[in-house]
Amino acid sequence: MTQRWNPPERDMLSVQRGPEPGGLGGAYRTFAATLRGLRTTLGRLAEEPVTIEYPEEKTPVYPRFRGRHKLHTFEDTGLEKCVGCSLCAAACPADCIRVVAAENTPDNQVSAGERYAAVYEINMSRCIFCGYCEIACPFDAITMGNDFELADYERSDLIFTKEMLLSDPVERTPLRREGE
Amino acid sequence: MSVLGAVSFAEDWWIQILKSLLIFAFILQVVPLILLLERKLLGRFQARYGPNRVGPYGLAQPIADVLKLLSKEHSTPRTAVPWMMAIAPVISIAAAVATLAVIPFGDRGTWGDSFGLYGIDVSIGILYFFAFGSLAFYALVLGGWASGSKYSFLGSMRSAAQLISYEVAIGLSLLGVAMQAGSLSIVEIVDAQDTIWFVVPQFAGFLIFTVAGFAETARPPFDLPEADAEIVAGYNTEYGGMRFGSFFMAEYIEVIVISGVATAVFLGGWHGPGPESLGPLWVVLKMFAFIVFFIWIRATLPRLRYDQLMSLGWKVLLPLATLNILITAIVLVAF
């Protein structure tokens, strides 16, 4: 306490110590700190709660948020972009994508290429939403959407088929606006 | 009348039964409301909403809580003493409710000459309050010991130590008021505050009473007997269902009791502006303010460390309370 303060030597860190606890000064400081604390909590009363009431009110996501996948079609012809190359399945670290390809025929032209995906399944209970499938795809046929509310009652319901991935999701997730 | 010899005034027996039923019913209805108020206010103190899902604005939350507690099963650990474990919550809630009897809501004659607006006006009101306050801690010790669990035992030991340390301080803090009023009867103490509330001449006593009162109710920041971060839930670790609910309820009744005593002894009881028949309203308002203060403190202060609890009780509150009594005595004799 009574030691004089010396400037720190080169290999010393400067240490600032608070006042010693106890004694009359300590009692005064404790009392003052208590009052400051009471003022702080009282200040919270006047503020609006920061709670976001989730099911009714959703936090907007960023545009690049990686949520549920989407498969795309060409807007003009309506043909599927996916040609069944299985590059996404190869890139997938969680091994959750299953693609079975089939040949396009003139009667049954599904995609723009020679082949199309007869089966395209993503097991959402295994997917880690890394987005590698999106990067691997040479035709931008699969992209990551913004939906994250994927909970279900059965594991089998979490295996998303091609039809489910092609159709627009029912619930839309709010997108964060510029500067928000 | 021999039993009631210590009572300055007693009503007919049927009025007394009616009064006790009324007070009991009133407090029992108020406890869930305080529970809700606490959770709501605590939420707002922390910039969140608090319960708002059950019913409009979450108003049905206490009902849901009580229903949940009622429908839960009791489990008894193998090492427990079942019958002692069962009576501990009973003692706890009985002691808490019994203390309510001496809290005055109004004088005799406030609403009618044949009865007073209090359970009973015993000439040893403050001693009565101490006696049952200590009994409530006995229930915690018994429950914790009979649970046969280490956490429970630690919690009950803590509550015993806390009781011993703070009962002294709370007693001495009220002694100053008793000396000034010249009576231990709580009704007479309120009467003595006709001109000035005792919070002014006995401000130190009021502060000591408030701090020690928090410790008496084992509420934050003195909730060491049930410090959930350190010893799970202390004495009620092994309790579930409505047995736990009884302990919980007893704690809140204790809060009401401490607020009532503080109101009566320091904050002028039923004295306030307006006609005398408004007295009970003032009592309830003052108690409400004190309870809100309880919640405010809970939202603000962290729990004391065990050694801090002990040194605050023995090294700060006890000497201060003694000094307060000495000064009061000197002033009373000298002037």
Image (spheres, rainbow, N blue to C red):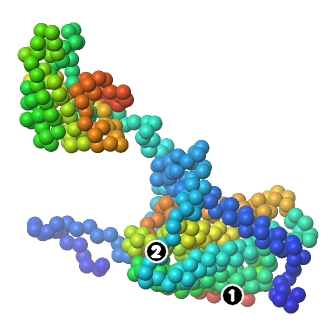
| Image vertical order of residue A107 relative to residue B2, above or below | above
Q: Which mark is residue B28?
A: none
- Label 2 marks which chain's residue? B
Asked if residue A106 lies left or right of residue A62, the reply is left
| Image vertical order of residue B124 relative to residue B76, above or below | below
Q: Please state which amino acid type lies under the numbered disc 1.
A: Ala
Asked if residue A142 lies left or right of residue B191, the reply is left
Asked if residue B131 lies left or right of residue A72, the reply is right
Nearest the viewer among A111 and A180 is: A111
| Image vertical order of residue B141 relative to residue A152, above or below | below
Q: CA distance from mark 1 to mark 2?
A: 48 Å
Q: Secondary structure at mark 1?
A: helix
Q: Are marks 1 and 2 on the same chain?
A: yes
Q: Quadrant of residue B304?
A: bottom left
The residue that mark 2 highlights is B238
Q: Secondary structure at mark 2?
A: loop
Q: Which mark is residue B329?
A: 1
Q: Please state which amino acid type lies under the numbered disc 2.
A: Glu
